[in-house]
Image (cartoon, rainbow, N blue to C red):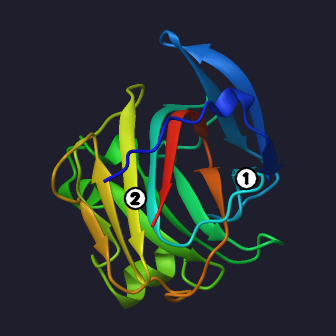
Amino acid sequence: MVHAQPIDLTKTRLLPINVSSSTNEIMGRSAVRVTKDPAIKAFDEATFAKLVGTDFKNGTIEVEVLSRLLKDAPAYARGFIGVAFRINEDNSRFESIYIRPTNGRADDQLRRNGATQYFSYPNFKFDRLRKESPGRYESYADMGLNEWITIKIVVRDEKAKLYLNGDEHPVLVVNDLKHGADSSGAIGLWVDVGTEGYFSDLRIRKD
């Protein structure tokens, strides 16, 4: 396997889509800070810093993420942070996998079971998937706020797998990406409400 070299996100052209982004130093490394536009009230929206010029269909996306809660984060904030992929040109269609770091070590087992999440924009957000297919598109994984977490997403046609922190086995398996096997598009650094998200050391390998 050919290992992709890290991409310095602080020197990469990013297009903010319903987010604010900036370059910051955090815990001894340079990273891109992303926060959601508070005017966007709905969940699982097109809220990401889009990597200009990327075109991804199959392969591996790997990135280091760190999530904190904003001072004004609502009680239901979970530190939502992840990756959007196969984003079309006008940002109206994409796939996404993200994590909820506060859920990973919660005392409530039901919350723990929702530490990771897949959704497909615009028609299959987390609430619809949870209602129609309980437990199928989310899972438990150990994680917490204010720590670097390695997210690796492996995509092949209509399937995607999420790996965390170099683990050999995936913590989430999606067998039916809703936009289908032939979808392709850009990659985005995704956050949701109440999150102060940091991204570093992105690697992209196309198959």
> Circle 1 — which element?
strand
Q: Is residue 78 above or below residue 169?
A: above
Residue 22 in view (yes/no): yes
Where is residue 12 drawn, in percent x and y?
Answer: 73, 36
Name which residue lies at 16% across and 57% down. 169
- Crowding around mark 2 (Cα neighbors within 10 Å: few <14, some 14 to 19, many 20+) is many
Where is residue 157 drawn, in percent x and y?
Answer: 44, 82
If the image is split into quadrants, where does the N terminus sit?
bottom left
> Circle 2 — which element?
strand
Where is residue 42 drawn, in percent x and y?
Answer: 69, 65
Amino acid, disc 2? Ile
Camera-nearest residue between 149 and 11: 11
Q: Residue furthest front?
A: 2
Q: Which residue is mark 1?
A: 50
Kindly identify which numbered label has been placed on residue 197: none
Q: Earlier in the sequence, mark 1 or mark 2?
A: 1
Q: Is residue 71 left or right of residue 23?
A: left
Camera-nearest residue between 146 and 56: 56
Amino acid, disc 1? Lys
Q: Is residue 171 above or below residue 126?
A: above
- Crowding around mark 1 (Cα neighbors within 10 Å: few <14, some 14 to 19, many 20+) is many
Residue 80 in view (yes/no): no
Is there a contact, CB below 8 Å, between mark 1 and mark 2? no
Q: Quadrant of residue 11?
A: top right
Where is residue 58 drawn, in percent x and y?
Answer: 48, 71
Q: Is residue 73 above or below residue 135?
A: above
Kindly identify which numbered label has been placed on residue 153: 2
If the image is split into quadrants, where does the C terminus sit?
bottom left
How far apart marks 1 and 2 lie (CA) works out to 17 Å
Camera-nearest residue between 106 and 61: 61
